[in-house]
Amino acid sequence: MTHFGFLSTYPPTRCGLATFTEALARELAADDARQPTIVRVLDVRDSGPGPVVIGRIPTATELIGRDRVTMRTAVRALDACDVAIVQHEYGIYGGPDGDEIIPLLRSLSTPAIVVLHTVLIAPTPHQRAVLETVCRLADTVVVMTDNARDILNRTYNVKPSKVRVIPHGVPVPRAAAATKHTASKRILTWGLISPGKGLEWGIRAIAQLRYTVPSVEYVIAGETHPKVLAHEGEQYREALQELITDLDLGDIVTLDNRYRDAAQLAELIADADVVLLPYDSHDQATSGVLIEAVAAGIPVVATGFPHAVELLGRGAGLIATHQDAESMAAALGAIVGAEGLAQQMHDAALRDTRHSSWPAVADQYRAIADRMISVAA
């Protein structure tokens, strides 16, 4: 059995990369008595400023300090594995644009799969240089959408033969009911809260929608992103609450900052009639929230970031204009006002994610790892 190593953020850190890595590592270990090795990139709320925690699922022994000893320990831990899976996001590693990942990758002797969570359409020269170097040092580069692969091939100097498209994994699709048959129509946004999520536009959209859908409610569920909390406190959440008050939406818009485990989150999603993703970003290559909403069979309204355009274009939702409350309200109204459309989107969503379950995704990583090991032998 292949012994996998991971370099990533990891729970208890709460972020998309951490939950992605936990789910993939768990699935890769499902049929393997040997558990993966985790080299964990510490988040700002962890004890100490160091970048790594080394251990095995489900426990880890923390190493504090961003020094060369820690880096060497991380490399030794990954080199003891057959294949290293490295999650790449500019913001999780130290140095300008996260360039401290480069010396670690250069030091690795074990084959490495690098998973790109962000592929910028218009990178700065240094962002481009960092990503191109990371991809050059990788044996295989994984992106999660066709659009991300196209941007990578068009904008960056990366060998196309290295690049593979593997979708973001989702829980095994649930047979969610497409129509809730309740008087109130619930719109849901969830995930870590931070500026750039466009939540103020979602709130303004509800202010317009309430005149055409009187029984609508909007739930924004999620804690403030830990990095935002460390540097700015709750300023963004407080500004959102002030906007809710100013628009007299206190009875139908809820900011819910409770932490939910996987089962509680699944229940919250299942109760939604529509998921709204009003993100400001035009560049977001991958959204775990988007793919999980689609996997649950819930219609989605999202702004036109690349992952949404690609995924929802097959019928699972509608695209709204960035920073346009009227456009968002119109899309939401079209779905909650027509049960037939919601049913069509539900069916399209479950069809589109049947090959994206975590077991299916893990099998694709196993196949890549097997080929890499055979080449290295």
Image: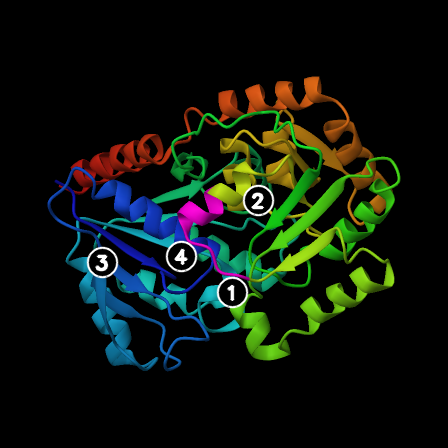
Please state the horizontal and vertical placement of residue 21, each as a whole percent of the image. 36, 51
- Disc 2 designates what residue? 285
Q: Earlier in the sequence, mark 3 or mark 1?
A: 3
Q: Position of residue 164 (x, y in %)?
A: 41, 35
Residue 359 in the figure: left or right of residue 101: left
Q: Is residue 68 left or right of residue 346?
A: left
- In the image, is 181 to the left or to the right of 66? right
Q: Gap in Å between the C-alphas at discs 2 and 3? A: 30 Å
Q: Looking at the rendering, in which quadrant would you find the C terminus?
A: top left
Q: Residue at x 77, y 46 (%)?
A: 322
Give the magenta-colored segment's residue range.
Answer: 258-266
In this figure, which residue is indicated by the disc labeled 4?
18
Compare marks 2 and 3 and give the one earlier in the sequence. 3
Q: Is residue 275 visible?
A: yes
| Residue count near mark 1 (Cα–Cα under 10 Å), binned few <14, some 14–19, many ≥20 | few
Of the two numbered discs 1 and 4 in the rendering, the one whose residue sits closer to the viewer: 4
Residue 347: x and y in percent read 56, 19
**Residue 185 place in picture, x, y as percent:** 70, 36
User: Which mark is in front, 2 or 4?
Assistant: 4
Question: Label 1 to label 4, Cα distance in Å?
Answer: 13 Å
Check disc 1 and give the amino acid type. Answer: Gly
SS at badge 3: loop
Marks 3 and 1 sit apart, C-alpha to C-alpha, by 25 Å
- Report the amino acid beneath label 3: Pro
Residue 330: quadrant of the picture: top right
